[in-house]
Amino acid sequence: MLLKNVGLQLYSLRDEMAKDFRGTVEKVAKMGYAGVEFAGYGDLKPAEMAQLLKDNGLEAYGSHIGGLPKTEAELDAEIEMNLAVGNPYLVCPWQTMSTRDDALRFAEVLNETAAKLRPHGLKLGYHNHAHEFVVDGGEVLMDTVLGNVEPDIFAEFDVFWVAYAGYDPLRYIRKYAGRQPLMHLKELGPDRKANVECGAGVLDFERIVKLGQEIGTKHFIVEQEEYTLPPLESCKVSLDNLLKL
């Protein structure tokens, strides 16, 4: 067994979370997930969230904090929440960019935000989609971003989107070894377009996970954006298949 502990990005259950945040977190724990990555906090206060995780034997693996830049009040709230739940990894999940200049401006924003988090022992990362793999000025925009930020700003590579963009996830995992504490395990369907359950598509998760472990990835996190099954069942199937590696 390659993986003993797997996390779930709670955006995978966004509709269920909107209806019953606490109850859905409990179901995630009962599935066998060891940790969660937040995409919102369901109006829970920091102490309440910490207790919810403790009650369900879950660890906070990360948090998607929305777009940047943040106001001072927004960032203070993120700092308070993530310190309370013991999560050091804050992730910007999306940034529109289409040119090298866009990527360079965003790198500045990442640097400025990371400087505000650093005194609290918190780290900032970026989660890719496919549009960051456009080439402008002779360089892939994802490389432009990562090449112009402080080295403690990490990449949370989503292997689905790297492959969807036409690149080899293994290449990017190797290229940024030591800068990937978190990784999204998301499956690319046989049509190379749809997101399906892990193990039902074309990605070689055994090689991906082994390489991630070799280069220092701490948390492997499932994210389902699309489903061939009801969402809760979909997330359980992905977990079960990954634990068979």
Image (tube, helix red, strand yellow):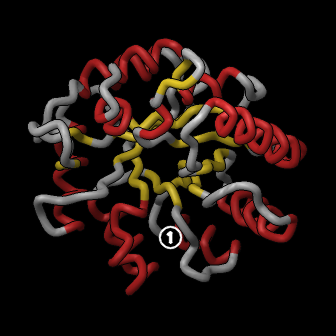
Q: Nearer the viewer, residue 108 or 209?
A: 108
Label 1 crowd bin: few (<14), some (14–19), many (20+), radius 10 Å? few
Q: Is residue 33 above or below residue 72?
A: above
Q: Is residue 104 above or below residue 95?
A: above
Which quadrant, please, contains the N terminus? top left
Q: Nearer the viewer, residue 176 or 99?
A: 99
Left or right: 28 with respect to 106? Answer: left
Q: Position of residue 15 (x, y in %)?
A: 34, 77
Circle 1: element type: helix
Q: Position of residue 107 (x, y in %)?
A: 73, 36
Left or right: 181 with respect to 224? Answer: right
Residue 107 in view of the camera: yes
Residue 177 in view of the camera: no
The residue most toward the bottom is 19
Number of marks: 1
Residue at 63% from the left image edge and 68% from the top image edge: 50
Residue at 66% from the left image edge and 39% from the top image edge: 102
Q: Position of residue 118 (x, y in %)?
A: 84, 41
Q: Position of residue 113 (x, y in %)?
A: 80, 47
Q: Give residue 155's quadrant in the image.
A: top right
Q: Nearer the viewer, residue 78 or 236?
A: 78
Residue at 59% from the left image edge and 35% from the top image edge: 99
Left or right: 206 with respect to 105? Answer: left
Residue tagged by mark 1? Answer: 55
Q: Residue flagged by tag 1: what amino acid is it? A: Asp
Left or right: 88 with respect to 177? Answer: right
